[in-house]
Image (cartoon, grey):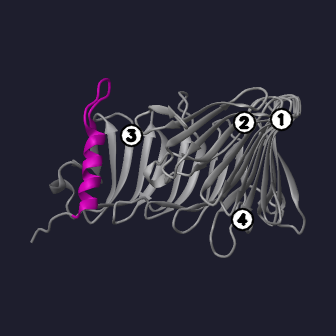
């Protein structure tokens, strides 16, 4: 009795068939098993057979592929060749997924054996344990460690000159013997400072690790000055960005969420001018923005905003520090893309601190009254404003 092939076997057969199809400039692949012709696209020629199938370019060309058959199913070793030289090999399981040791080589045109450029272990299609890759010239390019589910837990990357370029540590050493992450990741009982390098040999960053946890991280400008610094604190972290001349341009502070909640919330953000003067500051409480402030470059306040009880209360200033405006808005519903509505009385002031205009709003944010004052503080206009935009002088 003949049984239908499982999906994985069908998939492997289709892949094998694609490998033997004619392509421009290449001969048709001819395959045999123990000296007998087989066609991987025709299951009848491989049914019930076991052994190593070899496929060549034409009848007498070099071997381009070897694939193991077990009782008519493609299970076991798979090898690919280029110019007769082994280029890739791995194993597949009964599900058709890669399983076990897999290697790749860089093949030149001389026909000499290739240089190993990747080695990993797979379990049912997922990389597990230590995986390594190399530059074609020989130096280690990357080492990584993967959990049983394939998730990458730690890695180290290197430049062609063998200098460390990137590093991610785990709570315990995982990368030996490819890389000594016990020392680099601070697992030896004290913190470790690691310098990272770019392809031109210049330092691009510095990282401090302690017991596998990153305590601080710096990226560098080409002149060696700090570009960005991230530091871990007792309750969160601090992020700072600098210009190439060393001037602080940005700072943000974060607090870790308490309990079992993962993540963090921002508590402070500051922006600095190229001169080093503070020009913007925002503060948050429990993840909610509570205040904003801006300054002129002469150091005088430019704007202050407080977010209190569903209101945005705003003050603006002239460049001499005197008040220019005060007013409040009702915060709109962000879930409905709501627009903030003006509320209460908004006042505008001149540089002498005298009120020059008042605008009164109702609970719906509609302007209902408008007053104008002269430089001596005398009322010169007092209008009632209606819904259609028309107005009438009060008392007339």
Circles 2, 4 touching at the beta carbon (< 8 Å): no
Q: Residues within 10 Å of mark 4 (few under 14, many from 20)?
A: some
The answer for how far apart the CA atoms under marks 2 and 4 are is 38 Å
Q: Which residue is mark 2?
A: 160
Check the image and name the residue furthest to the front.
396
The answer for how far apart the CA atoms under marks 3 and 1 are is 83 Å
At horizontal 64% and vertical 41% (from top left) the residue drawn is 346
Q: Of marks 2 and 4, which one's residue comes earlier in the chain?
A: 2
At horizontal 65% and vertical 60% (from top left) the residue drawn is 287
Given residues 154 and 95, the one toward you in this image is: 154
Q: Of marks 3 and 1, which one's residue comes earlier in the chain?
A: 3
Q: Nearer the viewer, mark 3 or mark 2?
A: 2
Circles 4, 1 touching at the beta carbon (< 8 Å): no
Q: Which residue is mark 3?
A: 64
Q: Can you say whether 189 is above or below 133 in the image? A: below
Rendered image quadrant of residue 181: bottom right
Q: Is residue 8 a member of the stretch shown in magenta?
A: yes
Which contiguous range is marked in magenta? 6-29
> Which mark is on residue 256?
4
Q: Nearer the viewer, mark 4 or mark 1?
A: 1
Q: Of marks 3 and 4, which one's residue comes earlier in the chain?
A: 3
From the viewer's perspective, is 339 left or right of 376?
left
Check the image and name the residue furthest to the bottom.
259
From the viewer's perspective, is 138 left or right of 64?
right
Q: Of marks 4 and 1, which one's residue comes earlier in the chain?
A: 4
The answer for how far apart the CA atoms under marks 3 and 4 are is 56 Å
Q: Say if residue 155 shows up in the picture.
A: no
Q: Residues within 10 Å of mark 1 (few under 14, many from 20)?
A: some
Rendered image quadrant of residue 228: top right
């Amino acid at each position: 009795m003949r049984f239908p092939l499982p999906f994985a076997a069908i998939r492997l057969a289709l892949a094998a068939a694609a490998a033997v199809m004619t392509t421009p400039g290449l001969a048709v692949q001819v395959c045999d098993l123990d000296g007998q012709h087989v066609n991987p696209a025709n299951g009848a020629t491989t049914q019930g057979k076991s052994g190593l199938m070899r496929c060549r370019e034409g009848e007498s060309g070099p071997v381009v592929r070897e694939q193991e058959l077990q009782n008519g199913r493609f299970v076991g070793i798979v090898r690919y060749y280029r110019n007769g030289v082994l280029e890739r090999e791995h194993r597949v399981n009964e599900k058709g997924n890669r399983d076990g040791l897999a290697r790749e080589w860089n093949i030149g045109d001389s026909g000499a054996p290739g240089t190993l450029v990747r080695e990993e272990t797979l379990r049912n299609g997922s990389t597990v344990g230590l995986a390594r890759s190399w530059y074609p010239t020989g130096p280690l390019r990357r080492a990584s460690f993967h959990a049983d589910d394939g998730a990458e837990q730690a890695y180290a990357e290197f430049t062609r000159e063998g200098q460390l370029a990137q590093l991610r540590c785990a709570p315990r050493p995982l990368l030996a013997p490819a890389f000594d992450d016990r020392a680099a990741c601070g697992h030896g009982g004290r913190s470790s400072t690691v310098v990272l390098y770019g392809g031109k040999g210049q330092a691009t960053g510095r990282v401090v690790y302690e017991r596998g946890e990153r305590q601080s991280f710096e990226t560098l400008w080409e002149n060696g000055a700090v570009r960005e610094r991230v530091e871990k604190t007792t309750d969160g972290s601090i992020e700072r960005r600098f210009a190439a001349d060393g001037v602080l341009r940005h700072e943000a502070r974060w607090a870790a969420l308490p309990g079992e909640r993962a993540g963090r919330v921002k508590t402070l953000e500051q922006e600095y001018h190229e001169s080093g003067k503070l020009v913007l500051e925002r503060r948050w409480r429990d993840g909610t923005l509570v205040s904003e402030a801006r300054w002129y470059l002469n150091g005088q306040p430019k704007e202050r905003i407080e977010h209190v009880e569903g209101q945005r209360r705003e003050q603006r200033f002239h460049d001499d520090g005197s008040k220019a405006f005060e007013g409040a808005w009702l915060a709109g519903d962000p879930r409905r893309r709501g627009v903030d509505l003006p509320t209460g009385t908004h006042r505008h002031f001149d540089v002498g601190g005298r009120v020059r205009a008042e605008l009164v709003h109702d609970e719906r944010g509609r302007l209902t009254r408008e007053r104008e004052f002269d430089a001596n503080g005398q009322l010169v206009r007092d209008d009632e404003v209606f819904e259609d935009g028309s107005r009438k002088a009060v008392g007339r």
